Image: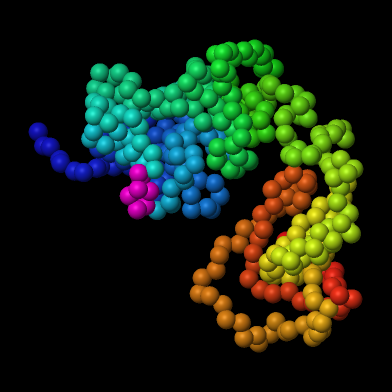
Amino acid sequence: MIFLFLSFQTSTSFQNFLKRRSYLSVEDSSHVLTSPDKTFTFGFYSVGDENTYWFSVWFTNSSDKTVVWMANRGRPVNGQGSKVSLHRNGAMVLTDVDGTVIWMTNTTSTRADRAELLDSGNLVLKDMEVKILWQSFDFPTDTLLPSQYLTKNTKLISRLGSGNFGSGYYTFHFDNDNVLRLYFSAINMGFGIKRRLTMDYDANLRLYSLIVTGSWMISWEALREKCNVHGICGRNGICVYTPEPKCSCPPSETTSTDSCMKFCSDDCQCEAFSYRLSGEGLCFTKSVLFSGKKTPNFPGSIYLKFPANFEVSEPASLVGTDLVCPPTFPKIMIGSSSMYETAVKRVRWVYLYGFAIAIGAIEVIFIVRLVVPL
């Protein structure tokens, strides 16, 4: 009999278990565990081309690889050098590229012999007698699966938003009286359907069913009247049906162009403001200006503030400029048109390194109207 003494070992033929002193690498897409019935997959999960990964369990056949559990929800790891290992001392440990321990199980000094992904979606650590020493079902994130319990010591915490896996503002748990009552009937009751109960980022609890196309159908939701969700429209917002639910401002909260202009004029740090009126007045002030550009597609206007003694000059040509640029540039994050739909959505300021122009002067302080993207 030959014994190989290695610090850790890996294999290209992972099944539904990971042996002690073995690991999964973030750099190898084949380093995953799959449940015996192939319903669930366990490994490193990423969104888009971002260099951030989460140690997760997800539905194998869902079109978007819907995640049902995460180990490092608030601390994603790097796309290179990160790995999860089942140590000799019985602990499963997730390390980042620099070796920093991001997450680990509480099974140190146990006889944990293997990590196994069950057909239920439960990731478990077992000893040689097949006794479960640790299970992911005891540490839910925002989703419950069939056969998974919600106890007085566990809770569901919503995400921050769609595509944002950070812990959000809403929880589903037992209260101080240890009372939790939830009765519901799904529209497609029966066996054989893959389901998940998720506390969504809009504070609504929903039951989803996986259909043959790989997408999810809402079989049940706790709050059918969307406007009943607490705080859905943010501070001072009003939820109205038109007939679809939509957020708007009360009349006294709608900002006019003049009031937005005065607000910027009175603020010494304000160098410009953006204003748009489409059902409600949206006023955004800016203290730093970058990348002025005219475009017919942006649904708003920006007003720049200059001193009265400002002298107008011809716009600089883009050809043959002597700009000195840094050797590296920040990654440009491009938002979609949906970010302008409601007043309550968070705005991401996109900084493009360049400069905008100016025109004319009026009285003590004057405002130049340009159409530029934010």
Q: Is residue 97 magenta?
A: yes
Q: Nearer the viewer, residue 373 or 274?
A: 274
**Residue sitting at 87 percent across and 57 percent down?**
259
Find residue 321 and report its horizontal and vertical position in percent: 65, 85
Residue 205, image quadrant: top right
Find residue 62 and report its horizontal and vertical position in percent: 57, 34
**Residue sitting at 39 percent across and 34 percent down?**
33
Q: Main secondary structure of the magenta part?
A: loop
Q: Is residue 217 magenta?
A: no
**Residue sitting at 15 percent across and 40 percent down?**
4
Q: Nearer the viewer, residue 264 or 146?
A: 264
Which segment is the magenta one?
95-101
Residue 230, image quadrant: top right
**Residue sitting at 47 percent across and 35 percent down?**
70
**Residue 302 makes an appearance in the image:** no
Find residue 109 and report its horizontal and vertical position in percent: 24, 29
Q: Would residue 364 appear left or right of 122 to someone viewing this image?
A: right
Find residue 97 and report its horizontal and vertical position in percent: 37, 52
- The N terminus is located in which quarter? top left
**Residue 326 makes an appearance in the image:** yes
Q: Nearer the viewer, residue 215 or 6?
A: 6
- The C terminus is located in which quarter? bottom right
Where 190 sits versus 358, above or below?
above
Q: How many marks?
A: 0
